[in-house]
Image (cartoon, grey):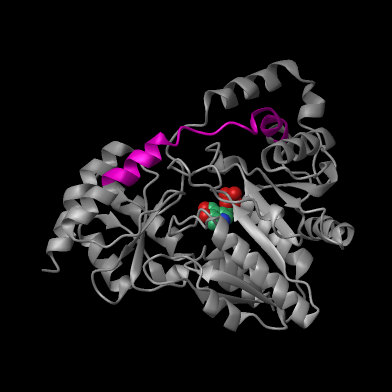
């Protein structure tokens, strides 16, 4: 008998992937330019030029055996040291290399972290709408994912609902800001309130609650004055799951890290748990070439002005056509109110106009669809009449 849970996970694709596959088929049938594929969060802008320069230099001028060789399981010391130094400079923390664990992107950061923290029967809270893989990652680690619905319209944290969801079984809370799929950024007040509530809960139950910040979109914030606060500055039991997939437009290279806050009392056990979970899952020694690369370009970001322009074009056009949308401050997603109650039916109808939109149900929030606007501006402009026709079909 095989492991039925994994067989099922392998057979049933996520609906985002399902839609992406449908898009590929449809493009072959009617031509690439006639399908408006907003399904995946695959960056459409190239990596910044410093990436190519650093890669070429690494390949030309490094010792090839060392460059392609194993590093320590948790990542090369010098790389981790550089990253810790950069975080300290940027966010006034006191991390060192041994707070950092190099990973194959945020997905690996999250699975390792969850496996390090949870025991069978624990609960992990997150805020809906949420990245669907949180459920897979949490359940696989043995925990139950508890989704707390965000406030209607704003998609900010609903603290009354969070308070009601916290229990003696709560081991961790996953937050994701800027958020996939809403694009919302949690501001300083919101994060402060969240940290205070978790501290109060821990004090009451005597049990630690860890705050995991999933941050693939940290650098993708579009407007001046909007910033996602760094959780280590206000919560000791915090762990940051970072990825360079979106900030450097390197999603296929699989590189990121986990940063564990050394201000927490049980830091050395938590970091050991991260190393142990990485070992047990086989997530040791993240790709060395890309470890060395990020040690050189950790402060660079791809040209996100393309996403900002796409956001503004879409916001204006969809508003004119009668759609309701919360203005996203970051990431590259728009969460649009479905024009009928059943967002799956709405996403199906959108397909008739060759628009590939993901139903919000998959993010734990029916009644909406996600538009992933990390696409070429030309495709985005070509798609606008289809959005208009879709809206008119409901009048
Ligand atoms: C919120 C969120 N977390 C994690 C991930 C996984 O990112 P990575 O490619 O770094 O594994 C994604 C990818 O889209 C995401 O949107």
Residue 32 at least partly seen: no
147 lies left or right of 5:
left
Q: Quadrant of residue 208?
A: bottom right
> For the point 28% across and 68% down, which residue is it?
338
Q: Decide which of 134, 35 is in the foreground and name it.
A: 134
373 lies left or right of 121:
left
Image quarter of the C terminus: bottom left
Image coordinates of residue 259 in percent, x first then y, are 74, 50
Image coordinates of residue 263 in percent, x first then y, are 82, 55
Residue occupying the far top of the picture: 61
Q: Quadrant of residue 322?
A: bottom left
Image coordinates of residue 332 in percent, x first then y, are 42, 48
Query: What type of secondary structure mainly makes up the magenta span?
Result: helix
> For the point 79% across and 60% down, which residue is it?
277
370, above or below 98, in the image: below
Q: Decide which of 111, 123 is in the foreground and name it.
A: 123
Start and end of the magenta stretch? 291-313
2, above or below 285, in the image: below
């Amino acid at each position: 008998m095989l492991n039925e849970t994994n067989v099922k996970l392998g057979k049933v694709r996520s609906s985002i992937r399902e839609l992406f596959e449908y898009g590929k088929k449809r493009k072959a049938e009617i031509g690439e330019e006639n399908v408006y594929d907003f399904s995946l969060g695959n960056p459409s802008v190239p990596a910044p030029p410093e990436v190519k320069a650093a890669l070429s230099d690494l390949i030309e001028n490094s010792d090839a055996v060392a460059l392609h060789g194993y590093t320590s399981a948790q990542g090369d010391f010098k790389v981790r040291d550089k990253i810790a130094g950069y975080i300290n400079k940027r966010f006034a923390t006191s991390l060192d290399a041994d707070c950092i664990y190099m990973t194959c992107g945020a997905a690996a950061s999250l699975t390792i972290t969850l496996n390090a923290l949870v025991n069978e029967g624990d609960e992990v809270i997150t805020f809906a709408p949420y990245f669907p893989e949180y459920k897979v990652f949490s359940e696989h680690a043995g925990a139950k994912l508890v989704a707390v619905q965000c406030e209607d319209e704003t998609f900010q944290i609903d603290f009354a609902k969070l308070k009601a969801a916290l229990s003696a079984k709560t081991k961790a809370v996953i937050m994701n800001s800027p958020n996939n799929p809403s694009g919302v950024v949690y501001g300083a007040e919101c994060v402060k309130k969240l940290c205070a509530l978790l501290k109060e809960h821990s004090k009451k139950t005597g049990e630690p609650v860890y705050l995991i910040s999933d941050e693939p979109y940290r650098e993708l914030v579009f407007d001046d004055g909007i910033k996602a606060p760094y959780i280590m500055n206000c919560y000791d039991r915090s762990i940051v799951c970072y990825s360079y997939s979106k900030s450097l437009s390197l999603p296929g290279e699989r590189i990121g890290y986990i940063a564990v806050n050394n201000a927490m009392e049980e830091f050395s056990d938590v970091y050991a748990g991260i190393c142990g979970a990485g070992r047990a899952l086989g997530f040791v020694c993240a790709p060395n070439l890309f470890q060395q690369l990020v040690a050189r370009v950790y402060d660079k970001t791809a040209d996100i002005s393309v996403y900002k322009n796409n956001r503004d074009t879409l916001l204006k056009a969809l508003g004119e056509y009668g759609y309701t949308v919360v203005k996203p401050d970051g990431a590259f997603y728009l969460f649009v109110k479905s024009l009928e109650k059943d967002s799956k039916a709405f996403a199906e109808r959108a397909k008739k106009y060759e628009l590939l939109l993901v139903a919000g149900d998959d993010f734990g929030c029916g009644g909406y669809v996600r538009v992933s606007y990390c696409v070429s501006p030309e495709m985005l402009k070509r798609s606008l009449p289809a959005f208009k026709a879709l809206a008119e079909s409901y009048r």
